[in-house]
Image (spheres, coloured by chain):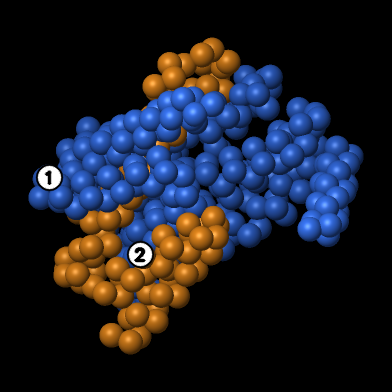
Chain colours: A blue, B orange
Amino acid sequence: MTHTSDPKTRRSAALAASRARALARSPMQSVWHGMVQSLPFLLVMVPFGLLFGVVADAAGYDLAQITGFTVLVLAGASQFTAIQLLSDNAPIWLVLLSSLAVNLRMAMYSASLVPWLGGASQPARMAVAYALVDQTFALSVDYFQNTPQLRMAQRLGYFTGTAILICGSWMLFSLLGATLGRAIPDTIPLDFAVPITFLAMIAPALRSLPHAAAAGVAVVMSLLLVGLPAGVGPMIAALLAMLTGAAVELRLNRQRGAAA
Amino acid sequence: MTQSSVTIWTTILLLGLGTFLIRYSFLGAIGNRRMPAWFLRMLRYTAVAVLPALAAPLAMWPDATGGQFDPARMAAGIATVGAGAATRNTLAAILAGAATLIIGLYLS
């Protein structure tokens, strides 16, 4: 037991050193650092981007429409949701409702960034909002929290770096997928990349009871409601799941409050 | 595909605008003002509610097999969730799912 303090002090020394390095970076160096730290996510963005291009091309969308999706929407999961439901001939209001519901989590990201970037200029905040996706958010909020003393220009620089690499690779590779898609052999089971990616994005959150309960209700209800018109079942299932998650969280909070 | 070009572009433009407004909401318009607690509580669960609801039918009745249950794809889905929950790492989850799918399809 006496040895446990040793790795702990080493870890806090490493954290202090990385903080000092972060604070010493110029805004340009912060951009570069953001890009470097985004590199591992290329392993996700490249195949996922290619896949969107391939799937959209196979569904009959032209290059301008695929570019429109990736540049104007810039939100992978909702883009897949939209083309899936459009192909199922779901009514347009339902396509929009389901696809926007997938993106509602980004309102949480927006709220979480207020303490760090709320003081930036209006154009800067609009640019951040445009590029606010799962990966740019996760990297940036972690970086900002680890080094709270960063200057605004360093924060915006880091976010810009993550956005260049992550959003840039998403656009580049979805267009590449759209143009080269036909060359990919049919034996590669690309179809299942969509559900795998969806599941992989939520799995790390399932350790909390409310999150697990919400996901469980979503799975069971969407399977039970599969006979409904395209998009309606998942929509109802998701709404019930959100209520479940919120209710379980509230109950846990009350129990903790009573125990304290 | 049966949709007209107008339908598709309308979807793209409205989806783009709506997504931007969601992302801009707190940073831009709402700022530090307080939101109702029940609303924030629901927002926390949107991703774990919507994405599994979309993924579950695709895993149970995959399009690629014409809606027939496929053990390889179901195993891949379970491996993805298992690895993701165990490692808390999205990339590890994707790799575990993809590896399971490739092995499963090879064996079947």
* Residue bearing mark 2: B77
The picture places residue A124, in percent across and down from the top left corner, at: 65, 26
> Which amino acid does the dot numbered 1 rest on?
Pro
Front-most of residues A246 and A29: A246
Residue A166 sits above or below residue B87 on the image? above
Q: What element carries label 1?
A: loop
User: Quadrant of the rendered structure where residue B104 is?
Assistant: bottom left
Chain letter for mark 1 = A
- Bin the neighbour count of mark 1 within 10 Å (Cα to Cα): few under 14, some 14-19, many 20 and up: few
Relative to A217, residue A185 above or below: below
Quadrant (top left, top right, bottom left, bottom right) of the C terminus of chain A:
top right
Observer-nearest of B12 and A12: A12
Q: Mark 1 points at which residue?
A: A229
Task: Looking at the picture, tell me which residue is in the foreground, B13 or A94.
Answer: A94
Quadrant housing residue B42: top left
| Identity, as a three-letter code, of the amino acid under mark 2 | Gly
Question: In the drawing, does residue A18 fall left or right of residue B27?
Answer: right
